[in-house]
Amino acid sequence: MVYDVLIIGSGGAGLSAALSAKKEGASVLVVSEGFPTRSQTCMAQGGINAALANEQEDSVDLHIEDTLRSSKGLASSIMIEKMCKKAPDTLAWLNAIGVPFSRTDEGKIAQRRLGGTASKRACYSQDYTGLKILHTLYDQCLKEEIAFLNEHYLLELSKEGASFLDIKTTETIMIEAKSIVMATGGYAGIYHGFTTNTSQSTGDGIMIAHHAGADISNMEFV
Ligand SMILES: Cc1cc2nc3c(=O)[nH]c(=O)nc-3n(C[C@H](O)[C@H](O)[C@H](O)COP(=O)(O)OP(=O)(O)OC[C@H]3O[C@@H](n4cnc5c(N)ncnc54)[C@H](O)[C@@H]3O)c2cc1C
C-alpha cells in the first residue's frame, strides 16, 4: 500500500498532524520508535500559552510582545505572530476533543503565569499537561481508526517513502508514501545526565532529513 501521508513520530506534533490529514480524507500511517502514549510530549508539565484572558487581562499582542522579548530578538516575528494568533483556537480545539484542562471557579480553562510572560497565560492540566494532551490525541486517533506502527526506527528517507528498522525483529522494512511529515522531536536527550529530555530525543530524525536534502533552520531554539 502507498500511504497518502506517512507521519514519523507520535508525539503531540505527529498525532495532531495525523488527525488533520485524516480529516482531509488522506490515508495515514504513524510510525515511531516508541509508543504513542510515551513520547517526550507526555513529560511536559507546566502548560501552553494562549491569550484567553480567563484569569487576568491579556491579548494576542501582549503574547507576541512577551515571546519576541524572550527570544532576545532572534526568533522569526512572522512565526511568533502566527503561533500567538492561532493559540486561542488551538486551545479551543484541544478543549473540544476532551483534554481535561484545570478549571477556574467559573468553569473556564484555568491559566497560570510561567516564565517570560506578563500575564497568567499558561493553560494546564494539573502537572500533567503534556500527558493529558498526548493521551487525548491518541484516543482521537484510535477513534478515527488511524494506523500505527510502533517500535520502528527510521533509517532513511527516499522519494518513494522511508525505511525502518523493526526494533523487535531487527528486520528492515520500506514504507511507501506520497508525502512524509517529520515529527521526530528535538535532540536534547543527547545531553544525557544533564537533561530532563527523553532518551528518544536524539535528533536522528533531523539528521536523516538533512541527509535527504531538507533545509534545517533555527536549531538553537530546540
Ligand atoms: C520535562 C519536560 C517538561 C516540559 N514542559 C513543557 C511545558 O510546560 N510546555 C511546553 O510547551 N513544552 C514543554 N516541554 C517541551 C515539550 O514536551 C516538547 O517541545 C514537545 O513535546 C515536542 O513534541 P514533538 O511531538 O515535537 O516531539 P516528541 O514528543 O519528542 O515526539 C517525537 C516522536 O518521534 C519519535 N522518534 C524520534 N526519533 C525517531 C526515529 N529515528 N524513528 C522513529 N521515531 C522516532 C519518538 O519516538 C516520538 O514518538 C517539556 C519537555 C520536558 C522534557
Image: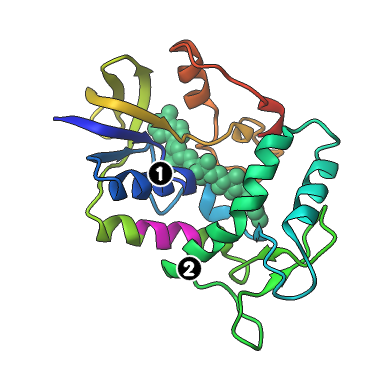
Magenta residue check for 136: yes
Q: In which quarter of the image is the C terminus?
A: top right
Residue that label 2 marks: 99
Q: Quadrant of the N terminus?
A: top left
Q: In which quarter of the image is ligand 1?
A: top right
Magenta residue check for 102: no
**At x 48% / y 63%, what residue is drawn?**
94
* Quarter assignment of residue 190: top right
Most foreground residue, 130 or 53: 53
Tag 1: amino acid? Ala
The extreme left residue here reads 1
**At x 60% / y 60%, what residue is drawn?**
88
The extreme bottom residue here reads 105
Q: Is 31 above or below relative to 173? A: below
Residue that label 1 marks: 17
For disc 2, the neighbor class at 10 Å (few under 14, some 14 to 19, many from 20) is: many
Where does the image place residue 48, in percent across and percent down from the top left?
64, 58
* Mark 1, secondary structure of its residue: helix
**At x 54% / y 27%, what residue is drawn?**
203
Where does the image place residue 213, in percent across and percent down from the top left?
47, 11
Q: Is 121 above or below relative to 106? A: above
- Start-end of magenta stretch: 132-138
